Image: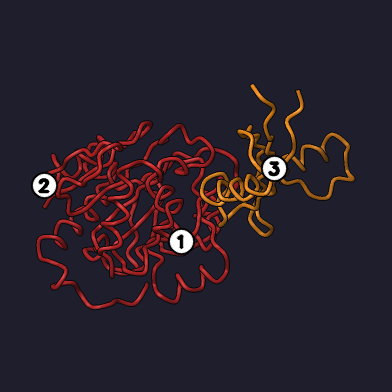
Chain colours: A red, B orange
């Protein structure tokens, strides 16, 4: 399969995403410049972490108007796979491809840590290789990762099993202590109604090799690879959340 | 430069949205002895100088700017004041 990683001015984690998909997974992985207008045949488009446009105005607010974002939005609307990590998640929310918004951490401090998240649904291209309720160890590093949305949106997300990851302790309990940023309902990642657009604050691309700690992120990348290779027709049936 | 219109845009956190900055400022004000402060919201102030235009049309344009870029309706409210630029 082919991965496309968008590079905005201020992106930081594009290299790690390219490395995870290319060097580690062995797939084709191409960088897509923010001024490009086509996705160069990418099956899965990754919006990486970083500080696109210096986080000016609001995180992700300016990146959503980059020329490439029209193609990304079209890809997402047509059922193509889109993955937003950290700043990429913020951009997807700003662009309206995912509901809600990410605001300043409740602590007002930048957090850089290894956290545990529970896989809430395996019914996405990104998590179908995991078990529902499984706890993964992934790094986070953000100042604006507190997920917020109005009550109706949150209720719909829960009802439609569109919360993909939740911050929990190692036993899988979504406690306040396990919540690093104050995110409502401990939400760490969500998907769109079509389940083909996923955004999350933790960084799976930093957790793909033993040398740097956890390899739990690799399984998420492998999920995407298996999904694309097998074709969506072979997708598993809906699963209950853990 | 001919005198133009000045738009003042105030962007504030929506009611009910957590505003940790406001909370932190409030507790600092309390620590300084300003106990009468009951609530603090920290937002943004944006000034836009506009080319000469009819105020009604300019107002509609600035509102559109707010909706599309300057504010995020999920988490923020905005208010626009339009006036003549003072020189």
Q: Which residue is drawn at 29% across and 51% down?
A: A72
Give the secondary structure at mark 3. Answer: loop
Image quadrant in which the C terminus of chain A is located: bottom left
Q: Residues within 10 Å of mark 2 (few under 14, many from 20)?
A: some
Q: Is residue B57 left or right of residue A57?
A: right
To which residue does mark 2 refer? A27
Q: Which residue is drawn at 41% across and 63% down?
A: A172
Q: Do labels 1 and 3 share a chain?
A: no
User: In the image, is residue B31 above or below residue A223?
Assistant: above
Q: Mark 3 lies on which chain?
A: B
Give the CA separation, mark 2 to mark 3. Answer: 46 Å
Which one is in front in this view, the residue at disc 1 or the one at disc 2? 1
Q: Residue at x 56, y 50 (%)?
A: B64
Q: Residue A99 at what x, y percent from top left?
A: 46, 61
User: In the image, is residue A53 above or below residue B74?
Assistant: above
Q: In this view, does B5 lie to the left or right of B33?
A: left
Q: Residue B2 at what x, y percent from top left?
A: 66, 25
Give the CA separation, mark 1 to mark 2. Answer: 30 Å
Q: Which chain carries label 1?
A: A
Q: Is residue A76 left or right of residue A181?
A: left
| Label ID, residue B78 | none
Give the CA separation, mark 1 to mark 3. Answer: 24 Å
The reply to whether dot 1 and dot 3 touch (C-beta < 8 Å) is: no
Examine the image and state in which quarter residue A40 appears.
Answer: top left
| Label ID, residue B42 | 3
Q: Which of marks 1 and 2 is nearer the N terminus?
A: 2
To which residue does mark 1 refer? A99
Q: Do labels 1 and 2 share a chain?
A: yes
Give the secondary structure at mark 1. Answer: loop
């Amino acid at each position: 399969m082919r991965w496309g990683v968008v590079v905005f001015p201020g992106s930081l984690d594009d290299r790690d995403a390219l490395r995870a998909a290319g060097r580690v997974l062995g797939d084709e992985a191409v960088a897509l410049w923010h001024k490009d207008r086509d996705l160069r045949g990418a099956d899965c488009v990754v919006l990486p972490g970083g500080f696109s446009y210096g986080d000016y105005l609001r995180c992700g607010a300016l990146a959503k108007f980059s020329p490439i974002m029209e193609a990304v939005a079209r890809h997402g609307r047509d059922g193509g796979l889109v993955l937003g990590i950290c700043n990429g998640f913020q951009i997807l929310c700003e662009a309206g491809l995912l509901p809600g918004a990410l605001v300043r951490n409740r602590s007002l401090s930048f957090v850089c840590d290894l956290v545990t998240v529970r896989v809430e649904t395996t019914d996405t291209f990104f998590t179908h290789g995991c078990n529902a309720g499984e706890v993964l160890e992934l790094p986070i590093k953000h100042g604006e990762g507190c997920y917020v949305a109005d009550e109706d949106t949150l209720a719909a997300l829960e009802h439609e099993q569109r919360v993909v990851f939740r911050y929990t302790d190692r036993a899988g309990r979504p406690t306040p202590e396990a919540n690093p940023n104050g995110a409502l309902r401990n939400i760490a990642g969500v998907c769109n109604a079509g389940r083909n657009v996923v955004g999350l604050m933790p960084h799976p691309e930093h957790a793909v090799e033993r040398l740097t700690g956890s390899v739990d992120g690799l399984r998420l990348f492998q999920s995407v690879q298996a999904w694309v290779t097998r074709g969506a027709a072979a997708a598993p049936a809906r699963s209950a959340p853990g | 430069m001919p005198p133009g219109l000045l738009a003042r845009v105030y962007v504030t956190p929506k009611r009910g949205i957590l505003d940790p900055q406001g909370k932190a400022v409030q507790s600092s004000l309390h620590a300084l002895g300003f106990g009468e402060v009951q609530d603090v919201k920290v937002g943004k102030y944006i000034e836009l100088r506009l080319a000469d235009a009819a105020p009604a049309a300019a107002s509609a344009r600035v509102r559109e700017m707010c909706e599309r870029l300057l504010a995020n309706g999920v988490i923020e409210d905005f208010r626009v004041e339009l006036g003549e630029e003072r020189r």
